[in-house]
Image: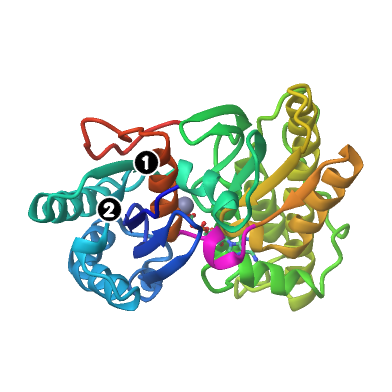
């Protein structure tokens, strides 16, 4: 097949990102400009601040991605941009920028679903055949998808309230640990006893792939309130125990629901069954191990893209663009910014 090169642009959450990727799986550049420092004082992502920062950073981020790839716009075959779902201000900034670049260069524009970007990432690093099972688990998302093609996904279930990353972030806040909560709760959990507190495993007995994490966070809050001293503090050990208990509960739920999803997926009878995971929470060691065990016992391979491609980035958007390009799919048409866009 002929060589194709796509510029990807991502600005749907709190990372401004641009990347240049070829259809032979070469990532020529992958630039991510984060905003963690801008939102730190507010304890979460502030949409208005994010939109403003994207508008300011997109220009420079794209220029850097092209420079690092030693390409100019004229060397690019198409521009792929995240057109949803996400924080609408940021999505609009990215879409406007991409439209401008496409109009100026005459290059085709491909609207990419952010979730499809995550879901197709295992094929950027490995030649993973369709259909595979994907657990997308991040700060904003939690769902099981059967990935059947670049534009073909079946959702088996997902969270009915918070995403696990969001729950990690909230638990960190409750316990006075720094953001992002995932890594700090994980570090704290290392010295904790996961069975010191009886925390719930919500929806575990429901025979589907749906999950819930908001009650678990509330249970941590309740336990904390029983433990706090007059100054509102808790002991290091209690804190570590709560982190360990919380992490184990999330891990148990994800693993049990993964087993259920694997069961449904295996009915499709692929010859090379694989569970792939993507999203920031996939960085968690205990969760990865639990998913590995669930896959092993189902006789299914387990794979996770490298962390830099698991968290939000534009290489995955460029890659999704290349996948759509290869099947001559125009992507989202008309290309408009969508805050909600289920796969
Ligand atoms: O995929 P991501 O970078 O952004 C989106 O949410 O789209 O995921 C970020 C989320 C945050 O909520 C963060 O706390 C969580 O992933 N996270 C973790 C870990 N590292 C990051 N959660 C659990 N354990 C970790 N080691
Ligand atoms: Zn994401």
Q: Name which of mark 2 and mark 1 comes first in the sequence.
A: 2
Instruction: Check residue 325 in the rendering and tell me which mark sits there, or answer none.
Output: 1
The magenta stretch spans residue 43: no
Q: Quadrant of residue 259?
A: top right
Q: Position of residue 132 (x, y in %)?
A: 67, 37
Q: Residues within 10 Å of mark 2 (few under 14, many from 20)?
A: some
The magenta stretch spans residue 307: yes
Q: Position of residue 23 (x, y in %)?
A: 45, 54
Q: Residues within 10 Å of mark 1 (few under 14, many from 20)?
A: many
Which stretch appears magenta?
Answer: 305-312
**Is residue 3 visible from the viewing direction of this image?**
yes
Q: Quadrant of ligand 1?
A: bottom right
Judging by the rendered image, the residue that carries numbered circle 2 is: 77
Q: Quadrant of residue 208?
A: top right
Is disc 2 in contact with disc 1, using a CB cutoff of under 8 Å? yes
Q: Left or right? Give the position of 26 relative to 3.
A: right
Circle 2 — which element?
Answer: loop
Residue at the front extreme? 1
Q: How is the image coloured?
A: rainbow
* 27 to 124, vertically: above or below: below
Q: Left or right? Give the position of 34 relative to 118.
A: left
The answer to which of 55 and 180 lies nearer the viewer is 55
Instruction: Check residue 38 in the rendering and tell me which mark sits there, or answer none.
Output: none
Residue displayed at 64% across by 43% down: 135
Q: Left or right? Give the position of 110 relative to 259.
A: left
């Amino acid at each position: 097949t002929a060589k194709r090169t796509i510029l990807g642009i991502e600005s749907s959450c709190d990372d401004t990102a641009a990347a240049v990727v070829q259809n032979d799986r070469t990532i020529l550049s992958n630039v991510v400009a984060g905003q963690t420092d801008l939102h730190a004082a507010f304890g979460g992502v502030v949409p208005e601040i994010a939109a403003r920062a994207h508008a300011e950073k997109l220009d420079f981020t794209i220029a850097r991605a092209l420079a690092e790839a030693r390409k100019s716009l004229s060397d690019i075959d198409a521009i792929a941009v995240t057109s949803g779902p996400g924080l609408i201000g940021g999505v609009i900034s990215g879409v406007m920028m991409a439209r401008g670049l496409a109009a100026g260069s005459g290059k085709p524009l491909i609207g990419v679903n952010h979730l499809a970007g995550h879901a197709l990432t295992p094929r950027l690093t490995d030649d993973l055949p369709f259909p595979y099972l994907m657990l997308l688990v991040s700060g904003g998302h939690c769902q099981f998808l059967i990935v059947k093609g670049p534009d073909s996904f079946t959702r088996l279930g997902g969270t009915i309230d918070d995403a696990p990353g969001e729950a990690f972030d909230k638990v960190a806040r409750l316990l006075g640990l720094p953001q992002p909560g995932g890594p700090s709760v994980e570090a704290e959990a290392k010295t904790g006893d996961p069975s010191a507190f009886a925390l719930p495993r919500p929806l575990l007995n429901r025979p589907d792939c749906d999950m819930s994490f908001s009650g678990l966070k509330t249970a941590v809050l309740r336990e904390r309130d029983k433990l706090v001293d007059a100054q509102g503090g808790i002991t290091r050990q209690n804190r570590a125990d709560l982190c360990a208990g919380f992490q184990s509960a999330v891990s148990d739920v994800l693993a049990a629901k993964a087993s259920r999803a694997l069961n449904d997926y295996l009915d499709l009878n692929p010859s090379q069954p694989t569970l792939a995971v993507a999203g920031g929470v996939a960085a968690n060691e205990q969760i990865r191990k639990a998913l590995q065990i669930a896959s092993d016992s189902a006789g299914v391979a387990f794979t996770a893209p490298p962390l830099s491609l698991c968290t939000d980035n534009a290489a995955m958007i460029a890659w999704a663009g290349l996948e759509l390009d290869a099947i001559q799919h125009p992507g989202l048409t008309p290309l408009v910014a969508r805050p909600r866009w289920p796969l």
